[in-house]
Structures are given as structure tokens and as C-alpha cells.
Amino acid sequence: MAESLICNNTQSRVSSVLNRDVRQFGKKFMFDSNEETCWNSDQGESQWVVLEFPQPVKVSELRLQFQGGFSGKSCKLEDPGRWPNCPCLLFIPNPPLVQRLKIVFENSADFFGRIIVYTLEILGERVL
């Protein structure tokens, strides 16, 4: 049974924040379960989110809620050495064991390359 893999000990990083305004648009808002808040990247190509889990995990599902015109048109999952350039799928068959996951939005529906994510959920299983 898949469970949420994001916990208090999961570390996250993002490529940018709109106008460096982390109080209003910071990465923490992807995980706060509030539909009114979001991470908003600044403009530029190849925006990304990196998650570092406190223990190895098998990621079987990603759930992303974008704002309409600020979504990733294509994305890939990266974990150097273990999961190179896997296509971004919502359901991942036979997931590899990883401790670090990078989601790269290679291009955006927005002309300036901005991405807005209201919710990011990572589901799968923890491996002890």
C-alpha cells in the first residue's frame, strides 16, 4: 500500500522562488495542504524540485497540482546513478530504490518559464 513519503525530515530544494519572496511563494507551500498557497518559481528554463528522504524509498506515484498556465509541459525524474532521466509519470511501475529525487520541469506552458505548484505529493514505500 502506497503511503506519503514526505515527512518532517524530508529535505527539499527548488530552483528559484518568484522575486525571492519565500514568505509568499516558498517551497514549503507545496506541502502545507492549503489550496490558497503555492510554490511559484521565478522565470527561466528548467525549473526543478529536489527531495532528499531520510531513508531509502520506492516512489510509485507523484501527484502535482499546477496552476493552469504555469504548468510543466514536460518533466523528467532524476536520481544520478540510479534513475537517470525517467519520464515523469503519475504511476511508476517497478520503482527503483532511491534516497534523492529530482523533478525537472524542462519547459513550461508559461512564456517566461515560470512554474506554479500548489500541491506535491510523493507516494510509495519506505525501505528500512
Image (cartoon, rainbow, N blue to C red):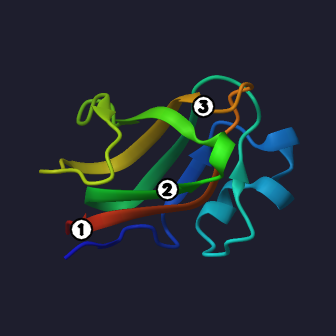
Quadrant in which residue 123 is drawn: bottom left
> Is residue 70 left or right of 74 when viewed as pictured?
right
Assess disc 3: are there few (<14), some (14-19) or many (≥20) residues with their C-alpha within 10 Å of its C-alpha.
many
Residue underneath mark 2: 64
Q: Residue at x 86, y 49 (%)?
A: 21
Cα–Cα gap, marks 1 and 3 = 30 Å
Spot occupied by residue 29 in the image (x, y as percentages of width and height): 68, 64
Residue underneath mark 3: 108
Q: Residue at x 74, y 70 (%)?
A: 36
Q: Secondary structure at mark 1?
A: strand
Q: Residue at x 68, y 28 (%)?
A: 113
Please tell me which residue lies in front, 97 or 110: 110
Q: Are marks 2 and 3 in contact (CB under 8 Å)?
A: no
Q: Are marks 1 and 3 in contact (CB under 8 Å)?
A: no
- The circle drawn on residue 125 is 1
Question: Residue flagged by tag 2: what amino acid is it?
Answer: Leu
Assess disc 1: are there few (<14), some (14-19) or many (≥20) residues with their C-alpha within 10 Å of its C-alpha.
some
Q: Residue furthest left?
A: 94
Cα–Cα gap, marks 2 and 3 = 14 Å
Q: Residue at x 70, y 24 (%)?
A: 44
